[in-house]
Image (cartoon, rainbow, N blue to C red):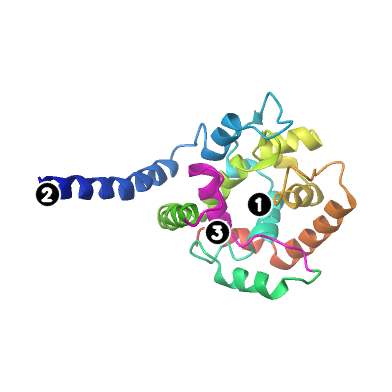
Amino acid sequence: MLRRLKHILLGTILFILAFPVFLVAAGKFIDPPIWGWQIHRSLFPPKDFPPFTAHDWVDLKQISPAMQLAVIASEDQHFPSHHGVDINAVLTIIKQAGTDSPSRGGSTITQQTAKNLFLFPSRTFLRKGVELYFTLWMEWLWSKSRILEVYLNIVEFAPGVYGVEAASQTFFSRPASRLTPQQAAQLAAVLPNPYRMSPAPASSYIKKRARWIRQQMRQLGTQTLDRLDR
């Protein structure tokens, strides 16, 4: 009986470790029809959540390079070079605490993609540990371009508005492929909290943050996008 219990326990552990790898491997080739964050919003909608949601998947090549660069400039400037976790960004956030520098989260684009795609909102250490496990496998199995493509297609830009194509159509009445640098910066500016901020009409805060993002975009340059799959 003890040996049987050990086998069951070992099998359970192996399944728990292997199933996320299977999901990540499938996500390399299959565009997800639904994801964790969207499911959570459907089951536990926030106050004033719209009855209908908007989403339209597009390939990365159909997303303006300005939009791609804007989210890297805003959310994760070391995205092309790190391996899932950006220690330098975390240290920078600690140093900038209490200053007037524009704030950004310590999570990388890969971590945010893992959280939005595979997990539900939670602030527990267990959730962060599972997120890190998914993150490391995504960095191992996916290209940087694939990570960015999935991120831009599932991130919520406003209540019930998922992905950059739906956001572009909703706020600027144009496809994501035709977003200008200013429009891209305004969309990226709301990502820390799309429930309290809107890209258009832009508030004074969004205008200020968009200016900072545009400045970072110019400093990074379009060569940043060329480094994604090196």
Residue located beneath label 2 in the image: 2
Kindly report which numbered mark, 3 or 2, lies closer to the viewer in this rendering: 2
**What residue span does the magenta drawing correspond to?**
101-125
Q: Residues within 10 Å of mark 1 (few under 14, many from 20)?
A: many
Residue located beneath label 3 in the image: 228
User: Which residue is at 54% across, 66% downward?
Assistant: 81
On residue 127, which mark appears?
none
- Report if residue 197 lies within the magenta region: no
Kindly report which numbered mark, 2 or 1, lies closer to the viewer in this rendering: 2
Q: Earlier in the sequence, mark 2 or mark 1?
A: 2
Tell me which amino acid carries mark 3. Answer: Leu
Q: Are marks 2 and 1 in contact (CB under 8 Å)?
A: no
In the rendered structure, the answer to whether residue 175 lies left or right of residue 27 reads right
Q: Residues within 10 Å of mark 2 (few under 14, many from 20)?
A: few
In the rendered structure, the answer to whether residue 171 lies left or right of residue 76 reads right
User: Could you tell me residue 3's position as x and y percent?
Assistant: 10, 49
User: Could you tell me residue 134's position as x and y percent?
Assistant: 44, 52
Q: Residue furthest front?
A: 1
Q: Earlier in the sequence, mark 1 or mark 3?
A: 1
Residue located beneath label 1 in the image: 68
Q: CA distance from mark 3 to mark 2?
A: 50 Å
Tell me which amino acid carries mark 1. Answer: Gln
Q: Earlier in the sequence, mark 3 or mark 2?
A: 2
8 versus 80 height, above or below: above
Q: CA distance from mark 1 to mark 3?
A: 11 Å
